[in-house]
Amino acid sequence: MIRIGMISYWHVHAWDYTREAQNHPNTEITAVWDEVPERGEKAAQQLGVPFVANLDDMLARDDVDAVIVDAPTNRHKEVMIAAAKAGKHIFTEKVVATTVKEVNEILEQVDANRVKLTVSLPRLNDGYTLSIQQLLAKEAIGQVTMVRCRLSHNGAIAGWLPEHFFNLEQCGGGALIDLGCHPMYLTRLFMGSLPVSVTAQFGYITGKEVEDNAVAVLTGADGAVGIVEAGFVNDHSPFVIEVHGTKGTILYNQTDNVLRFCSSDADSQWQELPILSNVQGAFGQWADHVQEDTLATDNIAMAHDLTKLMEAATIAAKEQRSVKLSELQS
């Protein structure tokens, strides 16, 4: 049994991961720490486990083998390095950190202390992603020339996002670094290799401290272009994926949950294709890595690329210029 200490209930998905830990046959929650003691005490009481006011004290407990990190993004480096040095395995909400330099510092300690890290990048495990990857592996649309992925919701205008999600210091950004992580890593995945430069435009519809409307454009070394769209100010905006190539196009729209494909190698007729089943999610994969002493190599590599792209996009929007990933401090 993997005994888990919860590091903060700051993130909106913290209770989702709590339920995953409760429902998994090989994990259980044994302690809670939170940078806001009142929130942590309430969560611990609900769970029937101790609240530990000092993080180092929780990490020193014999009944804590691992941690789930849902702390503010600007505290990820602090809490994950502390957990790694204490020998605790780590499951974390994305992004790992807001800069490549911080991610590298975290990974250095993860490696040095031989703990298992997995990052929550859930849409990598969804059937539509696996189906698109399968088509691309067959070069069904030729060379990929453009990828567009959009994910948006109404959290900033409907009032259900917590106010601290608009705190620039804690979050490191708004719609792009939070919700936009998903279309960002999917776009990077479908482009086939890490882009070389990023431009971005942020909008502030609600006048918050962070952007609530964002677009980033990724440029690949081969000339391919990726378009990442995210927002907190859109009602009924569907999650969509477009992958265009020299021979055809793949389309997915979550509204009707249909994968469409058209190629000059397939009579240039639009087809509806079956969608593969989802595979085990990131939390279950993490538990397996802990118990089987294996590494989440691909997951960590994608999370590392995600931070590179987010850091570049943040700089690009602030300075209104194209940012090369080679510029980023490591």
Image: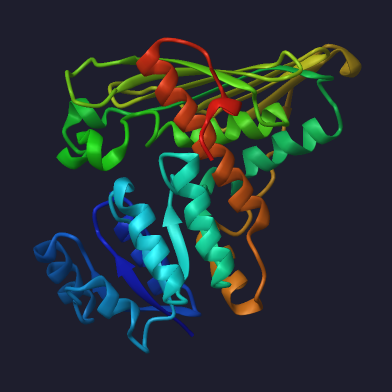
Q: Is residue 204 left or right of residue 144?
A: left
Viewer-nearest residue: 244 or 310:
310
Seen in the picture, residue 237 relative to 192 is either above or below; the reply is above
Name the residue rendered at 81%, 19% in the picture: 143
Name the residue rendered at 62%, 31% in the picture: 188
Residue 187 position, x and y percent, is: 60, 28
Name the residue rendered at 47%, 73% in the picture: 24
Q: Is residue 307 left or right of residue 32?
A: right
Seen in the picture, residue 88 relative to 282 is either above or below; the reply is below
Q: Which quarter shows the C terminus?
A: top right
Residue 272 position, x and y percent, is: 71, 27
Viewer-nearest residue: 263 or 137:
137
Residue 166 sits in which quadrant?
A: top left
Residue 175 sits in which quadrant?
A: top left
Q: Is residue 190 left or right of residue 34?
A: right
Residue 118 position, x and y percent, is: 53, 59
Viewer-nearest residue: 73 or 327:
327
Name the residue rendered at 28%, 49% in the picture: 72
One can see residue 54 in this view: yes
